[in-house]
Image (cartoon, rainbow, N blue to C red):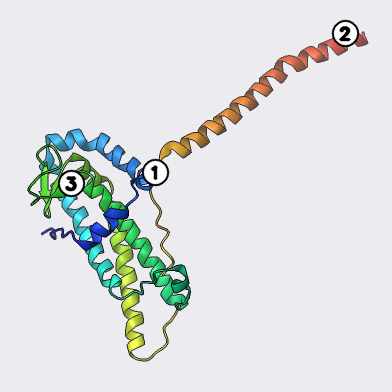
Amino acid sequence: MTQRVILGGWWDEYWNTFSWDNWKAGWGYMYRSASETLSAAITKEPEKYRPPTEAHLQEMAKARANLDWMRARVPDPKTDADLAKLSPEDQQAVKNYRSLEQRYADLWAGVMKDAEVAQQSKPQLGVAPLLIVAGLAMGAGSIAWCVQSYEYAVGLREQTDLQKKELEARYALAQQGKSLPPSTLPQQANEKPQSPTKDLSDLVGQLGYVAGLAGVIGLAWMVVPRIMAARRGAQS
């Protein structure tokens, strides 16, 4: 059974400061691509897409539980100066936690872009939801997002699992009065999907270079024989 989505202080906190402009640069492209590819099929047979949507939200719920566990235990420095006062291990834990929270926010933004809490008295979607999953009334865009970004949700859940297990082990050693070993987990890269715009511009630049080179070669192919013929005529 899919765990029910519970929205509260976490989402309100991120929503008030969330940058859609930054989100659109990478994740937004994936959202648009998923919507354009799947929306028609989802609208025609929404129940067909319930299982993958539930699976995505279940992964997100597990990741959220891990993050909430970490949030209650990882230091929360308010400034860079406060962060610098922490031990290297705690600094790494803070950076990893914040990176994972950002990844969660990015993925959750895609879920909520075409969805709302089902119990809201004044629906904002404008049309009847296609699916109600885990307490969310979802439109085609959000369902398509869940299908398309499922692997990212799995990756996030796996990363939070690993981070939680390491923190549990470190805290257990601390309670025993033992020194904490250095973190074995790297700082999260928090990579995001890339819009094809940059790749396209790079390709255009490369093609321009190739075309220019071809033009130079072609010009040489026409001019050089004429120069050689003129020299032979002058010598004779």
Q: In percent of the image, x 31 and y 78: which residue is there?
A: 168
Q: Nearer the viewer, mark 3 or mark 2?
A: 3
Q: In percent of the image, x 82 and y 11: which residue is there?
A: 229
Question: Which residue has dot 1 on it?
Answer: 25
Disc 2 marks a residue whose amino acid type is Gly
Q: How far across and how far down the image is residue 176, in percent?
A: 34, 91
Going by the picture, which residue comes out furthest to the bottom? 177
Q: Nearer the viewer, mark 1 or mark 2?
A: 1
Tell which of 76 and 129 is nearer to you.
76
Circle 3: element type: strand
Tell which of 9 and 183 is nearer to you.
9
Q: Mark 1 or mark 2: which comes first in sequence?
A: 1
Q: Can residue 184 be seen in this view?
A: no
Disc 1 marks a residue whose amino acid type is Ala
Question: Which residue has dot 3 on it?
Answer: 115
Disc 3 marks a residue whose amino acid type is Ala
Mark 2 nearby-residue class (10 Å; few <14, some 14–19, many ≥20): few
